[in-house]
Amino acid sequence: MCMLNKYLFGTIMVFCFFDTSRAQEKQKIVYACNTGIGYYKPINSSEELSGKGLSWSFSIQLDFPERYFVRGYLDMPTCHYSKSSEINGMVCFVDDNLNISNLGLSGGYSVPLRKFSAFGCAGVGLMFLSIPYVESDGIGASFKSSGCTYLQYTSSIGVNYQLFESVSIYLETQYSASFTKTGLDNIRLRGFAFLFGVKTPLW
């Protein structure tokens, strides 16, 4: 009888141990890396910005058990930039790419459905612009670039699909805009990015 009690007690302890381990595993925070590339389209009335561009996105994401997540993001869209100006009787043209870098923090929520999960997030950060321009050097003209920094905000929606246990692919639509007017024709810089990417755990 004593041996039976010890056996039952040992069996219960083993089940309790595994149950606690599973609960702790479900409650842990998951650290992930998101890397995406896609199409960028500015939306404004400026004649200086035209056409389309590319966008590259990188973020470190913390997934919490309650389906909430936090991202530290670096988004780098580019688009075509052109401007003409008259300097010393000469008409000068700038025809180049406008490089944009958005660095910030966002938070969101995801809704899982089998291997899919829909998500949405929003955040704020800094926008770094490198604006090309033409300047007179007394004799002729020289091409330069001006670095500017603005406050910006971003919001996005998308869907993940789990390929393997630790690897997912995602589609994401991202909107970003500066809070204030920029040096680009004195307007706010706004645009959409349509991204395809891969999500993998950091460890």
Image (spheres, rainbow, N blue to C red):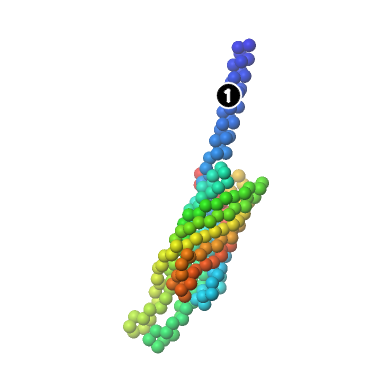
Q: Is residue 137 left or right of residue 70?
A: left
Residue 158, position in %: x, y? Answer: 60, 56
Which image quarter is the N terminus in?
Answer: top right
Viewer-nearest residue: 155 or 172: 155
Residue 49 drawn above or below residue 23: below
Q: Rate crowding at label 1 as few (under 14), some (14 to 19) or many (20 or more) other CA atoms within 10 Å.
A: few
Query: What residue is at 38 percent from the left and 86 percent from the top?
Result: 88
Residue 154, position in %: x, y? Answer: 52, 60
Residue 23 sits in quarter: top right
Query: What residue is at 55 percent from the left and 47 percent from the top?
Result: 68
Residue picked out by circle 1: 13
Confirm whether residue 104 shows in the render. yes
Q: Is residue 181 left or right of residue 200?
A: left
Query: What residue is at 54 percent from the left and 49 percent from the top?
Result: 69
Residue 54, position in %: x, y? Answer: 54, 66
Task: Pick out the residue farthest to the right.
Answer: 114
Query: What residue is at 54 percent from the left and 46 percent from the top?
Result: 63
Residue 110, position in %: x, y? Answer: 59, 50
Task: Pick out the residue farthest to the bottom.
Answer: 89
Residue 176 drawn above or below residue 113: below
Confirm whether residue 169 shows in the render. no
Task: Pick out the residue farthest to the front.
Answer: 180
Task: Pick out the residue farthest to the left.
Answer: 138
Q: Is residue 59 left or right of residue 118?
A: left
Viewer-nearest residue: 164 or 138: 138
- Mark 1 residue element: helix
How many labels, in total?
1
Residue 99 drawn above or below residue 164: below
Circle 1: residue type: Met
